[in-house]
Structures are given as C-alpha cells and as structure tokens.
C-alpha cells in the first residue's frame, strides 16, 4: 500500500509520462541564413543527419530552392514523356540530359552536392531550357514516347517499364526524330 505522499508522486510521474508520450514535439532549429544556398545547407544537414532521406529527394528539394517553377515544368516533362510515373523520374531524365549537354557526364546518382558551387547555375539554366514550353528536346522526347506507344507492340504496356530504364529508352530518341 502506498502512502498518500508516494501515491501523489506516482500520479505526477504517470501524468508526465502520458504527456511526454502523447503531446507532439516539434524540434526547432534556429539559423541565420543569407542566401538560398544557406537554406539548402540547413535543409541537407537536417534531413541527412537523422531520418534517412534519399539523396535524390534532397537533390529535388535543392533544385526547387534554386528553380521555383520546377514542379510545374517537370509536370510538362511527364506529359511529354507519357510513361514517366513521377516528377522524380522526370527530374532524373532532364537532369541527366542537362548534365550531359554541359559536358559534365552522367549525373547519377542524384545528390545535392551536384548543385553546389559554380556548377549549379549552368545546370539549373539547362534544366530551365530543357523544360521550356518551346523546348526542342521536350518535343523530341514527346515524339519519341508517342512513336514508341503507337508503333511498338508493347503500346501502353510501356508503362510497366521500370522508371530507372526510361532514361535509356528515351535517350535513344532524343538525338533523332523518329521516322513516321
């Protein structure tokens, strides 16, 4: 049997334990940032330091930091390419094309460090050009995807091609116009 004092202590501790368990806790980080790259640095450190986040996800967040209309432009890529299921797939395709076009080689794996220093501005500019409404490359990707859908025996079954292979499938048609 507990004494009244021990019971009071037990009740207090139990209530604190219940509050600690049920009350949401939001961690707060305070930092002074001067430019977009500082925001990116804080974001990268926060997300890569604890909960596992894929490098490509942080890369996408970084791209959106420096290219605010990225999501709507990537939606345009998805519409043209027909079979790319996500914005991340569209981002991977145009990032690889942009990097190769700049002579930087293949950009895979997508990592946030690809957007640091002097390489960031040309890459973001190339991404903007590739996804512009009047982009020749985007038109060719669309023509290639439509040609594959209409002329291959797989047709819409091409949706079953895994996302990591679409860069290669579409890469064949980017440099040349499909014959009609």
Image: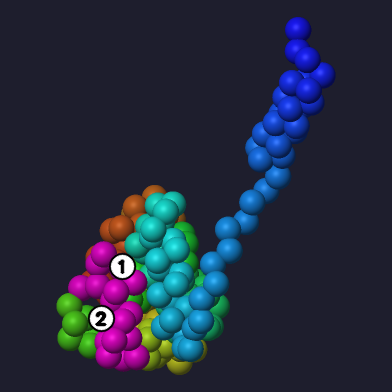
Q: Residue furthest top?
A: 1
Which residue corresponds to the image point at 34% horizontal and 91% vertical from the top-left? Answer: 121
Label for residue 99? 2
Real-space Cα distance between discs 1 and 2?
A: 11 Å
Residue 96 on the magenta segment: no
Residue at 27% x, 90% y is: 118
Image quadrant assignment for residue 116? bottom left
- Looking at the image, residue 90 sits to the left or right of residue 166; the answer is right
Q: Is residue 112 visible?
A: yes
Q: Is residue 114 magenta?
A: yes
Q: Which mark is residue 110?
A: 1
Please determine whether, in this image, residue 153 is positioned above or below residue 19. below
Magenta segment range? Answer: 106-122
Residue 4 in percent (x, y) is at 82, 19
Residue 171 drawn above or below residue 137: above
Q: Secondary structure at mark 1?
A: loop
- Residue 160 lies, in percent from the top left, at 39, 50
Rendered residue at 43%/76% (across/down): 40
């Amino acid at each position: 049997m507990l004494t009244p004092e021990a019971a009071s202590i037990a009740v207090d501790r139990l209530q604190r334990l219940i509050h600690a368990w049920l009350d949401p806790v939001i961690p707060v980080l305070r930092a002074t940032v001067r430019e977009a790259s500082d925001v990116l640095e804080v974001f990268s450190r926060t997300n890569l330091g604890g909960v596992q986040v894929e490098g490509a996800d942080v890369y996408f967040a970084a791209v959106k930091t420096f290219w605010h209309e990225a999501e709507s432009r990537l939606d345009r890529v998805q519409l043209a390419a027909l079979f790319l299921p996500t914005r991340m797939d569209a981002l991977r395709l145009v990032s690889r094309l942009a990097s190769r076009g700049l002579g930087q080689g293949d950009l895979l794996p997508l990592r946030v460090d690809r957007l640091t220093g002097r390489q960031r501005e040309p890459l973001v500019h190339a991404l903007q050009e590739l996804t512009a409404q009047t982009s020749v490359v985007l038109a060719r990707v669309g023509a290639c995807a439509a040609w594959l859908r209409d002329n291959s025996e797989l047709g819409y079954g091409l949706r079953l091609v895994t996302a990591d292979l679409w860069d290669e499938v579409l890469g064949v048609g980017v440099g040349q116009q499909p014959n009609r």
